[in-house]
Image (cartoon, rainbow, N blue to C red):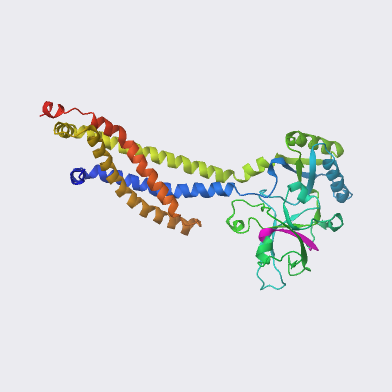
Amino acid sequence: MSLKPILSALLRNKAGAVLISLQIALTLAIICNALFIIQQRLSYIDRPSGLQESALFTFANLWVGPRDGMNIPDRIARDLQTIRSTPGVIDAVRSNSYPLRGGGWSTGLQTQQGPDQQRVMSTQYMVDDHALATYGLHLVAGRNFTAGEIENLDMQGNPAPKVVIVTQSVADALYPDGDALGKPLYVSDSVPPSTIIGIVERMQTPWVGFSWADTFYNNSTLVPFQMMAPFGHIIVRAEPGRREAVMKDVEQRLLASDRMRVILAMRSFDEVRANAYRSDRGMAILMSVICGVLLLVTAAGIVGLANFWVGQRHRQIGIRRALGARRRDILRYFQIENLMISLVGVVIGIAAAILLNLWLVTHYEMARLSLLYILVAAVLVLALGQLAVLQPARRASRVPPMVATREA
């Protein structure tokens, strides 16, 4: 089929073609970046924490009353023993924080002392020798803490651990040659070095949604301390399928053992993850809705214009049918016409998508748009255009040849 008649017809009806092309361009520009944002949010949500999340739950424990005579070390030991002896509990640990919580301690690690030394940012989790079993961490090298290595740390104390366990990402950043085990690291210029005695595969930091923390989201350091504070976070690992029952049992046992306490925010780790990534999930849903609405509006615009042109060209279609044009020729005519309009819109839309992404990169620190998303969005918009014009084109192809004589 010759494109010249189609192009001539479009030039006689420029306004409608231009409007649809611009609508397609706008839709493509937004959808390219929206799909990119959706993919980023989903991959962000799917980050592995390194924990056996399906078996974990957590809560905060606060002892109330006068601090004098509270005997925090004994209370910590008694509580942990109560929890660990609860039927259905595999293990439990007390810590200053935990992955995805939203708050915790961070520090810069270095292999040599000195203010000019390069520092590797990491979170610090204060734990005992039950942390690896509780979290279900995969120890890839070295060993766990021993009970004799666990020290009590006053709230105002400066943590100076003799030994530490780090994640693989910390080990690789500090010692790129892969020989971190047994090597020193400094958590501060004012304290002696710590020795790396173990390396775990992965353990996520507490912070989610903060750009400053995204650069080291897998950098975690386990230090063998128990914080001597009336407030602490307890993480419990339950046997498979028993988590909900164990949560209730643990709470009842702790309250029965000591009424001078408040148990806060007891929740499964599924809830912890859902809460941590709520805004990212909401962003992905919002972008999906925007994409859906834009595609529907664009499809409606194409259908409306095609129907208008079918009605406007009723007699011309009848003449073509009388001259021997088949139904599939009429169908193909409208599809090619729509494809030409869509291609113009796609070319403009690709340029607009790149410019929009550059603006987002400059103002919101987004990553650069991948060519894959431009290609996917272009194919999606073109396919949508062909589907949208199908019904009006089929209606045009059913115009009988006698229309040409009846309307003469």
Quadrant position of the C terminus in the picture: top left
Q: Is residue 165 magenta?
A: yes
Residue 206 position (above or below residue 163): above
239 or 17: nearer the viewer:
239
In the foreground, 354 or 401: 401
x 79%, y 40%: residue: 89
Question: In this picture, is 202 found above or below 171?
Answer: above
Q: Is residue 161 visible?
A: no
Residue 76 horizontal/vertical position (percent):
84, 48
Q: Kindly identify the residue that appears in the image at 77 percent across and 68 percent down.
A: 193
In magenta stretch: residue 31 = no
Rendered view: 182 above or below 273: below
Q: Position of residue 42 (x, y in %)?
A: 55, 46
| x, y percent for residue 105 | 70, 56
Image quadrant for the N terminus?
Answer: top left
Q: On the rendered structure, is 247 left or right of 319? A: right
The residue sitting at the left extreme is 408
Q: Is residue 394 visible?
A: yes
Task: Give the residues in magenta.
Answer: 160-169
